[in-house]
């Protein structure tokens, strides 16, 4: 799946599961870590786990598998690496503490309805 489409699909899956503060950053020209970063906030560790599992489940059904998933075991941050697309599902406290979106403030930013 083309990276922009994959980022949009992941954002839609997260939105359907009531993720908060969805944001997609296009970082193609800023880093070699990927082309798009998807950020979403979960309201609890259970919600965070559900969000990550739903993304993985739906994308797997569509033939897209992650290269790696980190932090799924009840933590405050799950990172899902799909190569050109990296998905960060975080609790609000972790998202505010790490503020990694600020590192990419020069990136083109999309809301959930823009990609």
Image: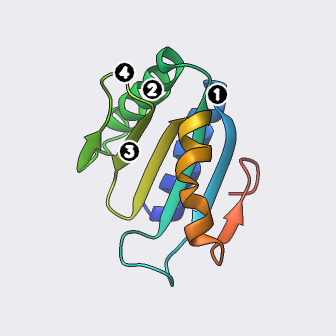
Return the x and y of residue 44 as percentages of the image width and height. Answer: 56, 19
Label 2 residue SS:
helix
Label 3 residue SS:
strand
Query: Which is more N-terminal, label 1 or label 2?
Result: 1
Q: Name the mark nearer the viewer: 1 or 4.
A: 4
Query: Which is more N-terminal, label 1 or label 3?
Result: 1
State the mark number for residue 54.
Answer: 2
Query: Which is more N-terminal, label 4 or label 3?
Result: 4
> What's the residue at 42%, 55% (across, down)?
86
* Other residues around mark 2 within 10 Å, as few (<14) / some (14–19) / many (≥20): some
State the mark number for residue 79.
Answer: 3
Q: Quadrant of the C terminus?
A: bottom right
Label 1 residue SS:
helix
> What's the residue at 35%, 32% (across, down)?
61
> What's the residue at 24%, 46% (across, down)?
68
Please report contact status of discs 2 and 3: CB closer than 8 Å, yes or no. Answer: no
24 left or right of 83 in image:
right
3 in relation to 10, above or below? below
State the mark number for residue 16.
Answer: 1
8 left or right of 67 in image:
right
Q: Mark 4 points at which residue?
A: 74
Return the x and y of residue 8 as percentages of the image width and height. Answer: 58, 51
39 in relation to 62, above or below? below
109 in relation to 7, above or below? below
| Distance in Å between CA atoms under marks 3 and 4 | 13 Å
| Distance in Å between CA atoms under marks 2 and 3 | 13 Å
| Distance in Å between CA atoms under marks 2 and 1 | 10 Å
Q: Name the mark nearer the viewer: 2 or 4.
A: 4
Please report contact status of discs 2 and 1: CB closer than 8 Å, yes or no. Answer: yes
Q: Name the mark nearer the viewer: 2 or 3.
A: 3
* Other residues around mark 3 within 10 Å, as few (<14) / some (14–19) / many (≥20): some
Query: Which is more N-terminal, label 4 or label 2?
Result: 2
């Amino acid at each position: 799946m083309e990276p922009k489409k994959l980022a949009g699909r992941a954002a839609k899956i997260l939105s359907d599961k009531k993720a908060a503060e969805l944001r997609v950053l296009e970082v193609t020209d800023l880093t070699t870590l990927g082309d798009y970063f998807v950020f979403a906030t979960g309201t609890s560790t259970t919600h965070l786990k559900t969000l990550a599992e739903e993304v993985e489940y739906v994308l797997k059904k569509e033939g897209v598998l992650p290269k790696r998933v980190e932090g799924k075991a009840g933590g405050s941050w799950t990172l899902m690496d799909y190569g050109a697309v990296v998905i960060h599902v975080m609790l609000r406290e972790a998202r505010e503490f790490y503020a990694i979106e600020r590192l990419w403030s020069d990136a083109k930013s999309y809301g959930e309805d823009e990609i």
